[in-house]
Image (cartoon, rainbow, N blue to C red):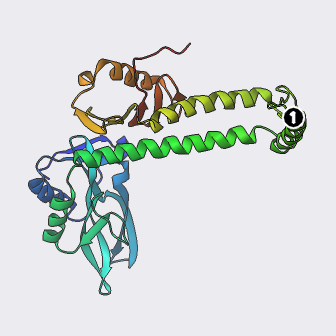
Amino acid sequence: MLTKIDTTALDAKKKGLPFAEDLEQFVDDVALVKPKCRFVLDNDCVRSIYKLNETTKQYDHYDAYYKVKVYEGGEELGSVGTSEEYRCGKKELVYGVESFRINKLRGGNMTTSIHKKVALRHAKKGLVARAKDELANQIRNMVSERVKSALGSIDNQVSWSTRQNEIARDFALASYHARINGEGIVTLQANSSVYISNIKLTDQVCEQYYEVKAVSDELEAKLGYGVQAYTDGSYAILDFKTDEVIKYSAFDQIPKDMGEKLAMFKVIQQGEYYSHLGVKLLDHVFYIVDGKTKVKQ
């Protein structure tokens, strides 16, 4: 193989495995039509391959690399691979190209062909990095969907941490008497075990709710920044206010205030919400709130 393959993400026991049939040559051919791309092997690229043993008439199996992932500018574009499929009643070697730009009703985002030239055309057309508007949509959707889901989840936790039937009943009765007496406010006991069985747990859930709600409100107001980190150390940052994406080739190029907040996420667990900071949504996706870095009191 002439093409350089990055194997740093492979477990030690999975290094040095064979490649699936004609995969090495296929990668070299793709590298010629996509010279700016980087090719990577990780543990997802390994699977068992079964071959019929003509002597024993039984299938032998061994682990091998069946695909190679393709990156450009730190962004994962997809993968290329080889495998065997039944075509017209017999097994044929096929060349596969996987890309987010491929959208099939069946088979998802991968297409295969028995003709290498056809597969190379698919690779040239499909393995293309996202334009800025596509990148903005990707970051916006990743951030918005996960924050919305988190708010729905913590909202349910608040409700289920209380005895809802008792609260609803007593509120209805208290409201009834308040209206009779011409009053506009009703009061329920805050520390009653009738309403809350575990006050400490409920308080913790409520604290979490306010953190998530504050982040969600800022996002709803189209403030803050969505950040996607790439494997090559570069970043794409979406400004929700202007809907503009700016790419930075290194961390030290990021504006100071945003960089300070991003640095804090190194010691924060995924899914922990902070109203003064933001949230780490995935290992490589973050939402940071607008404004100067604040120290929570």
Q: Judge left or right: residue 179 versus residue 253.
A: right
For disc 1, the marked residue is 178
Give the quarter of the figure containing the C terminus: top right
Q: Residue extending furthest bottom?
A: 89
**Placement of 194 over or under 99, stated as above or below:** above
Residue 227 at x, y percent in the picture: 35, 34
**Placement of 240 over or under 126, stated as above or below:** above
- Which of the two residues, 184 or 11, is positioned nearer the viewer here? 184
Q: Judge left or right: residue 116 versus residue 207.
A: left
Where residue 55 sits, quadrant-wise, is: bottom left
Question: In the rendered image, is residue 231 in sight?
Answer: no
Q: Judge left or right: residue 234 versus residue 268.
A: left
Q: Judge left or right: residue 273 versus residue 87.
A: right
Question: In the rendered image, is residue 194 in sight?
Answer: yes
Residue 222 at x, y percent in the picture: 41, 36
Q: Residue at x 21, y 55 (%)?
A: 127
Q: Residue at x 88, y 40 (%)?
A: 176
Q: Given the image, on which type of amino acid does mark 1 rest? A: Ala
Residue 20 at x, y percent in the picture: 27, 62
Residue 103 at x, y percent in the picture: 32, 65
Q: Residue at x 72, y 27 (%)?
A: 203
